[in-house]
Image: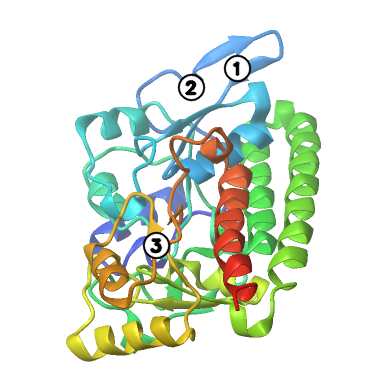
C-alpha cells in the first residue's frame, strides 16, 4: 500500500493538514486532477507520470520504472532542496502527476505552500518511510528546522535500498499492469546498490581510525558517517546558511591545524563562504565539493544517485588517504 504522507512527513506547519487529510479519503490509484490519467500510451498500457521532489528520487524512479514510467522532478538540475523556490511550472507538474514521490520527514518544507495552493489529491509515496532514521540533536538545528529526525537517510545505502522498495511498491499500486517489470528492475537496482555499499565499507573502513574526520557545512551527511565509520563535523546544525560564532570558528581552525579534522569540503549547490574563510585562516585546502542534497553537475558520474554517491566517496578518499600517508 502506498504510504500517504502525514503532516509530519512534510513540515511542522499545520497548513498541509487539510490536503493530506483529503488524500487519506480518496482511492490512491485514481487521478484526482482534471488532466489525462497517463503521460503516454503503449501496447502494454498507459505509462504513469511520477513527480519527485528531488533529482535523487527521480533517478531512483527511473531505475525502477524503466520505460514504463515518466519521471519528472520538481527541482531544476543541481538545485538543492533547501534552495528550492517554487515556480508556476511546479503547479503544472503536479497537475499532470499520477503519483508524487517525496523523501518526507521535513525535507520538502517548500511543498507545504505548493500543495496548499493546488488541487492535487493523488497518492503520495514517502520514500524514507521504511528507513532507519536518526534523531536530530535539538541544540544543533541552527535556523533550518527539519523536525525531530534527520531526513537525509539516503546517505546510508541500507536506507537507499528501502527507498527503492517504497518506490517499487508505489509504482506497482499506481500501475499494477507493469508490476513484474517494476519488481525485476528494482531487484537489479538493489543489487547495484549493495555492490556500492560493499565497496564503500571496504574503502572507508579501511582508513586509519584517526584519519576519518571531515568538516562540511551541512549536517545532512550524518548517515554517511554512521554507516561507514566517518566522523562528520559541521559548521552549525542542519542549515548550510547558518554561520558559526567566533568561538566555534577558533575551535574548528585549531582542529584543522592540529589534524583532528583531516578533510575540509564544500557542498554542491550551497557553497559556504565560511568554509572558504576557514580554509584561508587554517591553511588547509578545500578537498573539493560533496553533493549532498541533489545529483551533481559537470561530471558524467554524478548524473545518477549511485554515481553521485560513489563520486562523493572517491573525493573523501582522495583527501583522507593522502592525509593518512603524509609524514
Relative horizontal placement of residue 131, taking residue 250 as reference (left or right): right
Whether residue 131 appears in this view of the structure is no
Q: Nearer the viewer, residue 315 or 49?
A: 315
Residue 86, given in percent of the width and then of the height, sits at 23, 41
In the figure, 325 relative to 34: above or below? Answer: below
Do the residues bearing badges 1 and 2 touch, measured as CB atoms within 8 Å?
yes
| Number of residues whose C-alpha sits closer than 10 Å to that of mark 2, classed few (under 14), some (14–19) or many (20 or more) | some
Q: Residue at x 48, y 55 (%)?
A: 103
Q: Earlier in the sequence, mark 1 or mark 2?
A: 2
Alpha carbons under labels 1 and 2: distance apart: 8 Å
Residue 237, given in percent of the width and then of the height, sits at 33, 77
- The disc placed on residue 46 is 1
Relative horizontal placement of residue 58, taking residue 243 as reference (left or right): right
In the figure, 247 relative to 220: above or below? Answer: below
Q: Nearer the viewer, residue 208 or 26?
A: 208
Q: Quadrant of the C terminus?
A: bottom right
- The disc placed on residue 153 is none
Whether residue 232 appears in this view of the structure is yes
Amino acid at each position: 500500500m502506498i504510504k500517504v504522507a502525514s503532516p509530519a512527513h512534510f513540515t511542522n506547519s499545520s497548513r498541509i493538514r487539510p490536503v493530506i487529510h483529503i488524500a487519506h479519503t480518496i482511492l490512491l490509484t485514481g487521478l484526482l486532477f482534471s488532466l489525462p490519467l497517463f503521460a503516454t500510451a503503449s501496447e502494454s498500457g498507459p505509462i504513469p507520470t511520477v513527480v519527485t521532489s528531488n533529482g535523487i528520487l527521480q533517478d531512483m524512479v527511473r531505475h525502477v520504472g524503466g520505460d514504463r514510467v515518466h519521471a519528472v522532478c520538481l527541482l531544476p538540475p543541481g538545485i538543492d532542496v533547501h534552495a528550492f523556490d517554487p515556480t508556476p511550472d511546479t503547479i503544472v507538474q503536479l497537475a499532470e502527476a499520477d503519483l508524487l514521490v517525496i523523501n518526507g520527514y521535513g525535507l520538502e518544507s517548500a511543498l507545504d505552500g505548493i500543495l496548499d495552493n493546488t488541487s492535487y489529491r493523488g497518492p503520495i509515496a514517502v520514500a524514507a518511510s521504511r528507513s532507519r532514521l536518526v534523531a536530530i540533536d535539538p541544540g544543533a538545528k541552527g535556523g533550518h528546522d527539519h523536525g525531530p529526525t534527520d531526513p537525509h537517510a539516503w546517505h546510508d545505502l541500507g536506507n537507499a535500498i528501502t527507498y527503492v522498495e517504497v518506490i517499487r511498491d508505489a509504482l506497482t499500486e499506481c500501475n499494477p499492469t507493469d508490476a513484474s517489470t517494476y519488481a525485476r528492475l528494482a531487484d537489479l537496482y538493489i543489487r547495484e546498490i549493495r555492490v556500492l555499499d560493499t565497496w564503500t565499507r571496504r574503502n572507508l573502513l579501511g582508513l586509519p581510525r584517526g584519519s576519518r574526520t571531515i568538516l562540511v557545512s551541512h549536517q545532512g551527511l550524518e548517515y554517511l558517517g554512521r554507516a561507514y565509520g566517518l566522523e562528520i563535523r559541521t559548521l552549525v546544525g542542519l542549515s548550510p546558511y547558518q554561520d558559526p560564532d567566533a568561538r566555534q570558528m577558533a575551535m574548528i581552525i585549531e582542529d584543522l591545524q592540529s589534524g583532528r579534522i583531516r578533510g575540509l569540503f564544500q557542498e554542491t549547490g550551497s557553497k559556504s563562504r565560511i568554509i572558504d574563510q576557514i580554509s584561508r585562516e587554517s591553511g588547509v585546502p578545500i578537498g573539493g565539493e560533496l553533493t549532498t542534497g541533489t545529483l551533481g553537475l559537470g561530471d558524467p558520474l554524478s548524473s545518477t544517485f549511485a554515481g553521485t554517491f560513489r563520486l562523493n566517496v572517491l573525493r573523501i578518499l582522495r583527501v583522507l588517504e593522502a592525509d593518512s600517508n603524509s609524514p
